[in-house]
């Protein structure tokens, strides 16, 4: 038998005629796991295997999405040449024709409707080099103020809260290697077990070392399972829950007085407000029993070290900024920030969710986390770019507001790079209708996504296997994604595409780069002296160290592991606390007779965002091939919903049809639908348009809906 097996394996091995290896990083989440794709040619076919590679963040681990990522990159639907829409059909054209067409269309729009009629919509899944270049492209090549990106729908509340409270926003103030040794952890609105699976061993080790974990989520998830205590909060009530926790901490005198006096402002206002509240009211509002609020607060405040992590559950709310700020109030009150084993982490979402929010893709931002409305900042960047300060446009509007301006006829052209807004933006039916009003839409993508279908021209981009560049992961560690496979067909890198468009628009002098590293070297200078200072980071240093944590202000500097140890980043060095009032109209969309249930939305392990990539991967699609409605059996009975049937879910704005999935893990007043599917399963047809006033984040996590059998 053994002989036979050996013979079998020997023959198998001989069949492998050649083997190639490609080093890269996973194209999906913010862990940015390093990986190697092994391509074996076996007689008439190719076999692909992905293995994890050691690095300081994921330590060689991979999840199922990373292991199967190549399936979409090699999918037959990948677009490999420019496609022009002619009489409603996409036809193949040359790059030369595509670029000329863009020149004509952009110039006409600029001449007829003005410079600000063109818009740019970017992404946090592109490299730092590309995110930086996209910001420069909008301001210098197109001279438009209207640029924003998908990160607005993702991290903006946490970023704004950290900027307001600490004066700087790096997702995690510490590094992951501290997590196993902290004593108590709050995981609020984050499902790391499904969304950053390779982070889990850090938290599992913390548990082994005796840490107490408190999870806050309206649902039981794979993440809440590792928690010692689960506060099953009513959707959208995180700010009020934090008031409850603060009230107990302050009244039990578990605050760190010395820390507050020396390092913060605004504490008295917070104290006066929360002590005026009643715990009974807070418990009613949040759906969390008083006893749980009390013990969570006492546990968190009594331990000598602790960390709070948030993600989109808390942040994707129309009061997301305030909700995060109130959780930061807890950290400051208990002195658990700016020291070893204590800190805050906004678990970043997309692969480059961190870096892409630092270098000028945001409507109000210039590279290095500078402000486009600050005269000194404008002068500095204008000098780096070789343009006049007065010629730099002013700030524009946020992602969703761009579609409002399209609808109103103010914006008539768009360059869309690496995003699928028809599926990812709120009120999807409105977004689709707005896009149809554009005079010219060019989409740069790997596939004909649901949004690219409405484009006049689609340009083929390169994937993570082909496109080298830096990505900043959820620790704030700048990593170098190697990529050496040749582009398929005539696909080009996103940065090359921007340079070529700039060239036909007569702006070649500002965009003459020959490789990604040239752009990075300019970014280093552009970010120098800014909050997110990359000046001391070079490709060579990243290669040697496996990544560098920003800020890194000079070449001799080794990067910054822990932030705020001596002072916060505000001019007075102090953290700013504010009282976060319980507003009776949050969640804004109240349940009523017509729409009696809260809908919250989110993710599953096997799919990524709007699903354009993961729905193309057979191994991933097989795990979840359609969307579903998670509903409590009691609630289901009330609405005549049988298990595993098609059901209609409707809000004021639209209706979708998904399959019911009974589960006792969810609150009885709440249902959950993931957002990875399109068309009749596009849950964003139900989500409303209201935005957080501070960061312009939509309220993806609370809508009022009605469910009925189909
Ligand atoms: N598998 C997978 N992984 C991903 C992604 C993906 O699409 N799929 N996307 C990546 C990206 S871009 C992002 S931004 C991250 C997102 O990562 P997460 O934010 O962790 O993911 P979500 O599922 O959107 O929401 C997290 C949790 O919030 C809970 N929640 C809903 N409403 C509320 C509320 O009102 N309060 C509280 N406290 N919790 C609430 C949900 O039940 C859910 O369990 O994941 C990244 N990783
Ligand atoms: N209801 C609801 N809606 C949500 C959320 C939610 O929790 N609930 N979460 C929000 C969040 S956190 C996010 S991040 C957004 C994401 O929303 P989107 O940005 O719209 O989602 P993606 O699916 O990442 O779209 C990326 C597109 O770019 C293409 N692409 C991939 N790689 C490349 C590349 O290298 N270059 C180019 N040019 N194209 C590429 C893909 O094929 C795909 O079409 O969705 C938001 N929408
Ligand atoms: S999806 Fe995230 S955790 Fe999974 S392999 Fe990719 S980067 Fe790593
Ligand atoms: Mo995200």
Image (tube, rainbow, N blue to C red):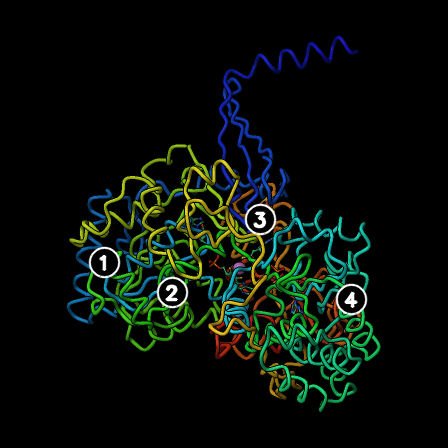
Q: Are marks 1 and 2 in contact (CB under 8 Å)?
A: no
Disc with the residue nearer the chain's start (1 vs 2) = 1
The residue beneath circle 1 is 141
Point out the image quarter for the N terminus. Answer: top right
Q: Are marks 1 and 3 in contact (CB under 8 Å)?
A: no
The numbered mark at residue 31 is 3
What element does badge 4 sit on? strand
Point out the image quarter for the C terminus. Answer: bottom right
Q: CA distance from mark 1 to mark 3?
A: 33 Å
Q: CA distance from mark 3 to mark 2?
A: 25 Å
The residue beneath circle 4 is 230
The residue beneath circle 2 is 370
Front-most of residues 603 and 265: 265
Is ligand 3 less than 8 Å from the beta carbon at label 3? yes
Front-most of residues 294 and 173: 173
Vertical placement of 412 versus 128: above or below? below
The mark lying in front, picked from 3 and 2, is 2
């Amino acid at each position: 038998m053994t002989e036979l097996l050996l013979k079998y394996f020997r023959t198998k091995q001989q069949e492998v005629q050649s083997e190639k290896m490609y080093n890269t990083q996973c194209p999906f989440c913010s862990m940015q796991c390093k990986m190697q794709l092994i391509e074996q040619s076996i007689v008439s076919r190719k076999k692909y295997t992905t293995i994890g590679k050691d690095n300081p963040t994921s330590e060689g681990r991979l999840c199922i999405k990373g292991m199967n990522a190549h399936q979409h990159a090699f999918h037959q639907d990948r677009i490999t040449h420019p496609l022009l829409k002619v009489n409603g059909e996409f036809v193949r054209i040359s790059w030369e024709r595509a670029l000329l067409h863009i020149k004509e269309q952009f110039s006409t729009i600029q001449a007829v409707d003005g410079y600000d009629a063109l818009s740019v919509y970017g992404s946090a899944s592109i490299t730092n080099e590309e995110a930086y270049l996209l910001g420069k492209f909008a301001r210098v090549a197109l001279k438009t103020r209207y640029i924003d990106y998908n990160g607005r729908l993702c991290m903006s509340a946490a970023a704004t809260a950290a900027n307001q409270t600490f004066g700087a926003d790096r997702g995690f103030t510490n590094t992951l290697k501290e997590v196993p040794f902290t004593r108590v952890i709050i995981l609020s609105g984050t499902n790391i077990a499904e969304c950053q699976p390779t982070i889990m061993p850090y938290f599992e080790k913390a548990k082994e070392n005796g840490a107490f974990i408190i999870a806050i989520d309206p649902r039981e998830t794979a993440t809440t399972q590792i928690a010692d205590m689960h506060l099953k909060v009513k959707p959208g009530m995180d700010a009020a829950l934090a008031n409850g926790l603060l009230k107990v901490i302050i009244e039990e005198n578990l605050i760190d007085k010395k820390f507050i006096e020396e390092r913060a402002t605004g504490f008295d206002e917070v104290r006066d407000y929360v002590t005026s509240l009643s715990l009974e009211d807070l418990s009613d509002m949040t759906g969390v029993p008083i006893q749980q609020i009390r013990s969570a607060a006492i546990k968190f405040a009594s331990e000598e070290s602790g960390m709070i992590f948030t993600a989109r559950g808390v942040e994707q709310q129309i009061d997301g900024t305030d909700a995060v700020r109130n959780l930061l109030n807890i950290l400051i009150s208990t002195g658990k920030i700016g020291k070893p084993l204590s800190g805050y982490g906004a678990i970043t979402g997309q692969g480059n969710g961190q870096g892409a929010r630092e270098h000028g893709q945001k409507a109000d931002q210039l590279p290095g986390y500078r402000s486009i409305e600050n005269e000194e900042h404008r002068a500095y960047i204008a000098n780096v770019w070789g343009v006049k300060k007065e010629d730099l446009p002013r700030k524009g509007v946020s992602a969703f507001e761009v579609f409002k301006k399209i609808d109103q006829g103010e914006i008539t052209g768009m360059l869309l790079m690496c995003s699928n807004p028809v599926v990812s933006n709120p009120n999807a039916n409105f977004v689709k209708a707005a896009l149809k009003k554009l005079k010219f839409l060019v989409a740069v993508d790997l596939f004909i996504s649901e949004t690219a279908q409405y484009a006049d021209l689609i340009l083929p981009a390169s994937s993570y296997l082909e496109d080298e560049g830096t990505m900043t992961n959820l620790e704030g560690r700048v990593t170098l994604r190697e990529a050496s496979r040749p582009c398929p067909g005539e696909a080009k890198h996103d940065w090359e595409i921007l340079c070529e468009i700039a060239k036909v628009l007569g702006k070649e002098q500002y965009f003459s780069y020959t490789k990604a590293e040239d752009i990075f070297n300019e970014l280093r200078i552009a970010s120098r002296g800014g909050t997110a200072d990359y000046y001391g980071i070079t490709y060579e240093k990243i290669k040697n160290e496996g990544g560098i944590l920003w800020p890194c202000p000079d070449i001799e500097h080794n990067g910054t592991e822990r932030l705020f140890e001596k002072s916060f980043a505000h001019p007075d060095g102090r953290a700013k606390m504010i009282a976060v009032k319980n507003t009776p109209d949050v969640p804004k969309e109240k349940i009523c007779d017509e729409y009696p249930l809260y809908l919250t939305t989110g993710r599953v392990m096997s799919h990524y965002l709007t699903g354009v990539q993961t729905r193309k991967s057979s191994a991933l699609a097989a795990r979840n091939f359609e969307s579903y409605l998670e509903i409590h059996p009691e609630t289901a009975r009330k609405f005549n919903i049988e298990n595993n049937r098609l059901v209609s879910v409707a809000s004021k704005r639209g209706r979708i049809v998904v399959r019911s999935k009974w589960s006792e893990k969810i609150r009885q007043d709440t249902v959950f639908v993931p957002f990875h599917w399109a068309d009749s399963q596009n849950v964003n047809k139900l989500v409303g348009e209201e935005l957080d006033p501070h960061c312009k984040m939509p309220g993806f996590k609370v809508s009022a809906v009605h469910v009925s059998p189909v």
